[in-house]
Image (tube, rainbow, N blue to C red):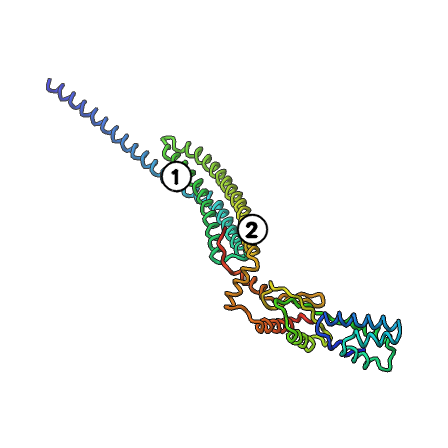
Amino acid sequence: MSSLLLSKLSTKDDLDILKGELESLEGAIYQSKDKYNEIIRSDIRSWVSEIVHKESAGKDVTKYIKELKNEIETVPVLSACIGFEPSSSFIESVSGWLKKNVDDKLVVDIVLNTMLLGGVQLSYAGKYLDLSLRKKISKELENVNFSKS
Amino acid sequence: MGNELTYVLIALLSAFGLLLIVFVLLYLKSLKVQSGLREENDSLKHQKEDLEKGTYAPANDQARQIIEAANKKAAEIIANVQGISEQEKQILNNSFQQMLAANLKDYRSVAGKFSQTYDSFIGGVGKDVKARLDMGLNKIIADAQLETKKTSSVVNSSLQSLYRGYETEVSEFKKRILSQIDSLGVDFIKHVSLKVLGKTLSKKEQEDMIIQSLEEAKKLGFFK
């Protein structure tokens, strides 16, 4: 199973929100069908509920939600530390680039750190790469002359 | 009376002639002794030169080797120091050269003292040249060998302590420089970044830089 929901996720926040929504749905299923319908109408984002309805049609909803939750746990996360507050369109650009060039399920976890000055520090699958301007300038500083104290 | 006077005169002349012959013989003998002394003196000078060359050559070689090794070691240490300019490195190199030169000067001073002692000995050579020469030369050779050993040992140990001191000094200097860089902090980096970039980055430039960084990460194989 590969849900369309996962391809719609851009950030780790999106992923966490979806996890919460699925938890609510799963809890409602065990209560009653009415409760489930109430939750999916009122507490779940419309685009999510549409996909859930579409993908669970004719299936065991409990099994569908469980499989979806398991699949979510496998979604890769890229941590990107940047030096400015990103706009929504920029996050979409970054996410689009990552899905196209790395993994179509990959989500990005953006962390703000103004000390970077520019560029980005990446952390992914146990690896770390510092491509920040701060790092590059610090490297250049090694060639700067200092007078002896 | 006339004949008696003639005999006396002849006798006096004969005696004077004998004395003259004795003086001539003594004079010739004296010339021979002087010539012998000159030859011995020349021989001594040659022996002195040979002695100096022979006994000091190994010590000189050793000192030279030590100094070359010291230079090499110093150059390695200085070349590996990060965070200092070429000019700073040149200053360190020059300082080390001066310290070595001072050490070498001490060594030569010891050699100079030996030479003075030897000259003094030669100046005191008298008639019994040969006996004293044999005795003196043996003593000088023994002294020279001892001095050479002492000098080499002094040069060696002082250079070794020089390495240690110098290495510590370079290490401390390096720590100081790194600590200075650390203490510069973000403000300095920002200042330099602005100087380097010539302006504050716009948001668009920031965004472009991140996309470029992602491209760079991909080229580096970070996402594999």
Q: Amino acid at mark 2?
A: Ser
Q: Nearer the viewer, residue A115 or B28?
A: A115
Residue designated by label 2? B171
Count all numbered tags in the image, as a single digit. Answer: 2
Q: Check the image and name the residue furthest to the left.
A: B2
Image quadrant holding the C terminus of chain B, namely bottom right
Asked if the residue under mark 2 is in contact with the one under mark 1, i.e. CB atoms within 8 Å, the reply is no
In this rendering, does residue B17 appear at all? yes
Q: In the visual, does A78 lie left or right of B62?
A: right
Where does residue B112 sit, x and y in percent of width and height? 41, 40
Q: Earlier in the sequence, mark 1 or mark 2?
A: 1
Compare residues B209 and B79 and report the one nearer the observer. B209
Chain at tag 2: B
- Left of A121 or right of it: where is B149? left
Q: Nearer the viewer, residue B169 or B117?
A: B169
Say which chain tag 1 marks. Answer: B
* Quarter-of-image position of residue A70: bottom right
Q: Residue at x 33, y 38 (%)?
A: B38
Label 1 residue SS: helix
